[in-house]
Image (cartoon, rainbow, N blue to C red):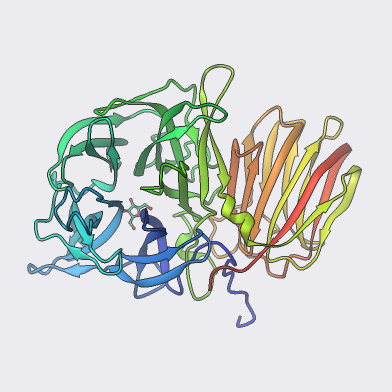
Amino acid sequence: QDNMPTYRPLFHFSTDSNWINDPNGLVYHNGQYHLFCQYNPFGDKWGHMSWAHAVSNDLFHWQQQPLAIPEFTNPDGSTTMIFSGCAVADSLNTSGFGTAAQPPLVAMYTAHIEKGGKVQSQQQQLAYSTDDGKTWTRYAGNPVLDIKSTEFRDPKIFWYTPGKQWILVLAKPDEYKVRFYSSPDLKQWTYLSDFGGIGDISEVWECPDITEVPVEGTAEKRWLLTLSAGHEVKGYRAMQYFTGVFNGKQFIADQAPYPLYVDFGKDYYAGITWNNIPAADGRVIMLGWANDWRYANDIPTKGFRGQYATPRVLQLRKKDNGQYRLLQWPVAELDKQVKQSHTLPGFTVTSGEHPLYESVIPALDISFDVTLPYATSAGIALQQDSAHTTIISYNNATGNLEIDRSNAGLHNFSTLYTGLDTLHAPGLEKASFRIVFDVCMLEVFVNNGEYVLTDLVFPLQPQTGVVAFANKGTAAFSNIVVKEINKTVH
Ligand code: FRU
């Protein structure tokens, strides 16, 4: 047992120890990215939810800071856990928590109040920092929003420039709705509207976010509403999105023929975007928790439990039918973490295998194009030995993109951790792949991020190579670049 790997990723965020789930309070401020997270200071399973804190200059080298907002006990003996929420840079000091010269950072979290094991309330509270996020003070006037509900959570706030006010979106999970409010000062909130009941309503709605996102190759922007819920067909937790218009009061969704999912892997949830990215940068950057609630407490990592996916830039692609689809791509800062880059010659492979890269590889960023008009399926395998592989492939006959982790390593820690992810995506007989692999994390980006799958794998031995393959025919691999990535965390 002691020889077991820790599964600590090399460049994906994890905390020094203990449990994490959702990212919270993502805000860029004075040259630093701040990240807070749902954190248990006392153990490596969910509980005692508090906000941990880390800062980074480049989204990859993170320095964990002192606990930002701990769970606390109330005078009546009830306990308040600090559930998910957001942080904003209150540059105009609208809240009055700072001064014009020293404006505050303001966090809004859901106070999840329990007494004797019974949930009493989920209400929204504020905390602020006047020392660039180092220390946090809870607002004496809390709560700032309380509708006497036990299902009302995960606030995300942004500054709405046309209306010169703050807009808040948060979830009414068991009603499959999100709700909008506005405020001049972050303290007084006015109800605006509800949105929901459409899309995927197979699981409670949590962690909404709304932001205006650039449309690829144009000067246009479109509003994007994301949230975390479920996948009605596959039965696991998943993020979904809607595109549309936000008019300052309500969100009007574009028609979509079916629910739209952010990520088609099993392990991507609770993603939210960074607030306050400078206009000159202009990126919308999302960070998600790479895990699935169904087995998150049981994954076999050692010394920590919970990791975040690569921060991703979001864009929209306008399709020929006028509909918008989400694109996700690793932030360019990942390229700066490259240790060695190899541009490799292309090749064809016919009904068999061809080595693509051989080396002991804890962390890789692999790109290639594959054309397989004459093969039934083709792809690559991350190989430990002949029996232990993680397979990423496209099946031309079924039109399915697949990740098969059933022989990738440990899987018996939970019966809910299952092997095969399938995404029906016809027309990929010529496609570009980017595969980001880091110890226990696999992120697959197809066609510039139009399809993304994130999955956890727990190899029992080091990965020793990447093998390309084609079944029943020929596939051509080209534009192959393999990058080894540096260790940036811990
Ligand atoms: C989502 C979530 C949130 C909640 C938090 C509690 O993963 O259930 O809705 O605020 O986790 O840790």
What's the residue at 88%, 48% (across, down)?
A: 345
Q: Please give left or right for residue 229 compared with residue 77 in the image.
A: right
Q: 76 or 453: nearer the eye?
A: 453
What's the residue at 12%, 56% (across, down)?
A: 142
Residue 117 spot, x, y in % from top left: 21, 64
**How many discs mark residues in the rendered view?**
0
What's the residue at 19%, 31% (across, down)?
A: 192
Q: In this view, does 45 lie above or below 286?
A: below
Residue 114 spot, x, y in % from top left: 19, 61
Q: Please give left or right for residue 323 compared with residue 53 in the image.
A: right
Q: 365 or 418: nearer the eye?
A: 365
Residue 259 spot, x, y in % from top left: 47, 30
Residue 247 spot, x, y in % from top left: 29, 25
Q: Quadrant of residue 317?
A: top right
Q: In this view, does 53 lie above or below 257?
A: below
Q: 153 or 404: nearer the eye?
A: 153
Q: Is residue 323 above or below residue 27?
A: above
